[in-house]
Image (cartoon, rainbow, N blue to C red):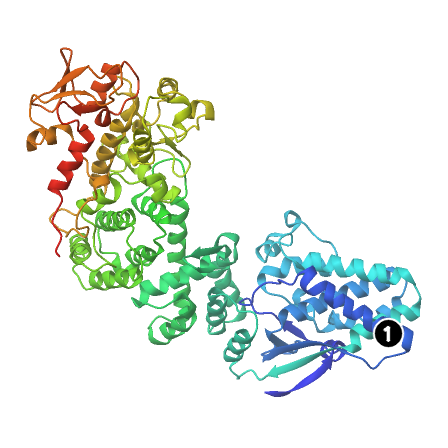
Amino acid sequence: MIPPNFQSLREIFQTPVRIDVPLFQRPYVWTRDTQWEPLWEDITRLTEDSLAFRDNQSTHFLGAVVLQSSSSPFGGLPRWIAIDGQQRLTTLQIILNALHRQLVAHGHEQIAAQVLPLVENPEYIRQTDEDRYKLWPTNKDRAAFVSAMTATYLDTNNVGPTARAQGDSTSSRLVPAHQFFTEAIDTWLHDDDSPERATALVSTILDRLRIVNIQLDSNEDAQAIFETLNARGTPLSAADLIKNFVFQNLDTAQHQAEDAYANYWEQFETDWWEKEITYGRVTNSRSSWFLWQWLIARTLTEFPIREVFRQFKNYVATTDIPVSGLLPHIKRSSDRYRSIIEGGSRPIGELSRPELFSYRISTLDSEITRPLLIWLDEPEQSGIPQEDKERILVILEGWLVRRALVKVPSQGGNRLIIDLMKTLSKSPQDALPSVTARFLTANATTIGYWPSDHDVRASLVGARAFQKYRRDRLRMVLEAVEDNRRGYPDGKQLSMGPIPRGRGTVEHLMPQKWRKHWPADLTEEQETARDSVLDQIGNLTLLTQKLNSKVSNGAWTTKRADLINHDDVLLTRDATALEPPVWDEEAIEARTCELVEEILTIWPVPEGCTVTDHVSGQTTSSTTVTLKDLVRSGILPVGTVLHCARQNSRWHEVTATVTADGGISLAGTTYTSPSMAARAAAGSESENGWIWWAVVGTGQTLDQVRAAYRESTAPETNS
């Protein structure tokens, strides 16, 4: 390494030279508020002091740059590669160019003549168009750099195909930077357009801005220095570090490296890949997340994303694939990765099984499964039949959804998925679905168990699902039920197609504000009972067209008619098709049980596998008991006479009889539920029959009889 030099801009740029910013460096990111304005204020302060106090000794330190010597073509310009400080160097070239142009514009051509040689190389030594400039930026910034340095500020529609491939001048910050310094210099010179003032400004910029110039020999380890400098400054993303490492170690000519960059890596510097994504409490660019997941799929090793760069270097050191061979491999996987995620994000139309899996796991925050998606599509797994790959995803989705419904903590999921991939990699490729099923159902630990039907029922029946689950997650489950009824993805498909994903509104059938438009002569206890069922899944549906608030909160007759009029969701017909047309607590609880059973069939325990219950017993509120259960148990004998539980009610003398099939006989008509019988007796649209009817003689309401039954059948606990 050449000893560091404390140099002015004149000293750095005075001789013919070409400083290349390698394509693996990040594009220009400096901004007006953070860098341009403070730098210009420092320049004008030094210049004003020089004019006022004849102080030509003060300098301003701009930091350090690291340049590495590079091979030059015979008879060509000396070449250097900018290892660090390219933001600083680029800004200074922009300033020098803007300064030269404004000096000429203000009639100071002779003064401007000493600036131009610091920006452009003499024509006699140029071998290419790029040799014109002392600095040649990274690929993404080239169109904008040329636009700025020629002051044309071209729109990319007017840029040729070569320049357009080298970046979009309208999206780069280089043109705004040039505009800022051009306007700032123009304004400053206009205040007093004298040669003395122009000379002072030139002297400040050329001689009093100082940089430590660290120059490396071509054989020194620039990568190690780059990583050290990055660790001390603003951290680069994992994708940036890996890009730098890959292209530093790419053993090809420069033009081949640029072709490799354009063909295999440039995509990672587009908005989609650079978008910041948060999983858990960690935020990274999507490209960094992909590279982490891809590397896990390749190595079957667990490590946090903060270690992905170190793990990548280890992988390169131990794999037989050269760096040049890794690039097309990464590109192929990333294309498939993006295709699945973007496909799963489409709200309309049928999805492939991987796309549907991607959509559903996105609502579950289950990104831990992405490495498995990548692994299944790697060349080594080409022998796995496509239908088996899809079956693996179906099984894994069932495990994930059930665990989300019972709200099992997800800690340790990464390790379990990696262990699954290891198991699959050692198994015959024609047996992987059954291996997956056995692996997931055999795990009895908290971090890995497959919730049983009993566990899911205990979590959903009687639960306030609307409050218990995140809205997008709840919507996804209801969408799955609706699609199941429409025959998607695996049944007899209806012409209406799958329900639009991620767009539907989760609607309460009985509104949360039921008191205003669903009046009923309810006691405080009955009102509490009604409130307790409002948020159950049985009271929820999906709407593709949101109801206005008047209809949404209106009486059931009005709301039902509107729902029938917009009859495009099969899920809603559970409620609108009921006869008589009544929607109450009993109907909600019955529908909850029906939906839960349907959910269990959509995401079943794999055939031939058994799982253990992890919930010891259901709570009273989550156990569904029918009148038929009470009759069968003998706790409510056939022929039991019932009357209205309200002592002072005008219906207190009305009586009914319990039938052998669990119905209630009233005035010659048998009703299949207590509430239907209560509504018939009271002549009202809404009654909770469980608390309306009481046993003649004991005074117990049917709800109290039901509670006694639950208590008698509850499992014993160890003391």
In this rendering, the answer to whether 672 lies above or below 169 is above
Is the residue 200 above or below the residue 382 in the image?
below
Residue 493 visible somewhere in the drawing: no
The image quadrant where one finds the N terminus is bottom right
**What residue is pinned by disc 1?**
49
Residue 449 visible in the shown view? yes
Residue at point 16% right, 16% down? 655
Question: Residue 41, image x and y in percent?
Answer: 78, 67
Place of residue 340 in the rendered image (x, y in percent of width and height, measured from the top left): 37, 48
Q: Amino acid at mark 1?
A: Asp
187 sits left or right of 141 in the view: right
Query: Closest to the observer: 160 or 574?
Result: 574
Residue 592 spot, x, y in % from top left:
25, 34
* Towards the viewer: 627 or 288: 627
Instruction: Identify which residue is drawn at 69% across, 51% down.
Output: 154
Q: Nearer the viewer, residue 671 or 236?
A: 671
Mark 1 lies on a secondary structure that is helix
x and y, in percent, of residue 541 in the image? 34, 31
User: In which quadrant is the C terminus drawn?
Assistant: bottom left
Quick check: 33 above or below 398?
A: below
* Residue 239 left/right relative to 175: left
414 in relation to 233, above or below: above
- Is 7 displayed left or right of 48 in the figure? left
Taking the view exactly as shown, the residue that stands out farthest to the top is 668
Q: Quadrant of residue 572?
A: top left
